[in-house]
Image: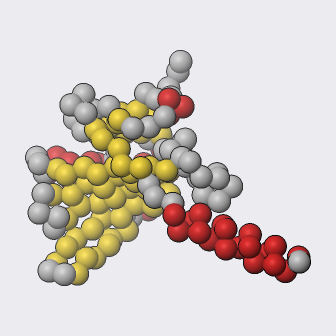
Amino acid sequence: MRKTMIIFLFLLVNSLTIAHEDTLLKVDDKGNIVGLPDQFLPAKFDLDAKKIRIKDTEVTLPKCMSSYIAEHENLEIKITASWYHSKELIPYYMNIKLSDKEGKSGYFLLVGLETLELIEAKEMIQNGNETTNINFDLSCLSTYKNNIQVLKK
């Protein structure tokens, strides 16, 4: 019986993990990130100021990341997030993908939804059918971390 229960729990956890899907968010004309629950509001992605804000935490993207925004006028922005799983397994997160309209280059940031701390960040370059992922250098990542601010209420 105990063995059967362990197998059942294992299958249940695996099926829940497989069924997990991120929620697609939108950025409106004013830079508001739309689709997050109230606990993460206000939420903004200000392309002009190159800032991301979730609730009372804000980060200014360092030049090593924001220069891509300045170089491309017609960026495609895709933001997904997940906050409806156990934080003990993985933190609540938001994935921001910026790319040119042709999809030939871009980068993505995976950040903690509650802290805006980087979980992962890569630059992507598409060459034919092959995508190359390039890690940002340590000074860039360090600057990002130092730019995170908790705003006064």
| Residue 114: x %, y % from top left | 55, 41
- For image coordinates 60% across by 58% down, the residue present is 90
**91 on left or right of 9:** left
| Residue 139: x %, y % from top left | 41, 58
**97 on left or right of 19:** left
Q: Is residue 117 visible?
A: no
Front residue of this view, candidates 56 and 61: 56
Q: How many marks?
A: 0
- Asked where in the image residue 103 lies, by quadrant, the reply is bottom left
- For image coordinates 48% across by 34% down, the residue present is 37
In the rendered image, the residue lying farthest to the right is 1
In the rendered image, the residue lying farthest to the top is 153
Front residue of this view, candidates 77 and 19: 19
Q: How is the image coloured?
A: secondary structure
| Residue 115: x %, y % from top left | 54, 42
Which quadrant would the N terminus be assigned to in this image?
A: bottom right
Front residue of this view, candidates 122 and 94: 94
**14 on left or right of 41:** right
| Residue 70: x %, y % from top left | 16, 46
**45 on left or right of 43:** left
25 over 20 or under it: above or below: above
- For image coordinates 22% across by 71% down, the residue present is 125
Q: Is residue 59 visible?
A: yes
25 over 3 or under it: above or below: above
Front residue of this view, candidates 54 and 145: 54
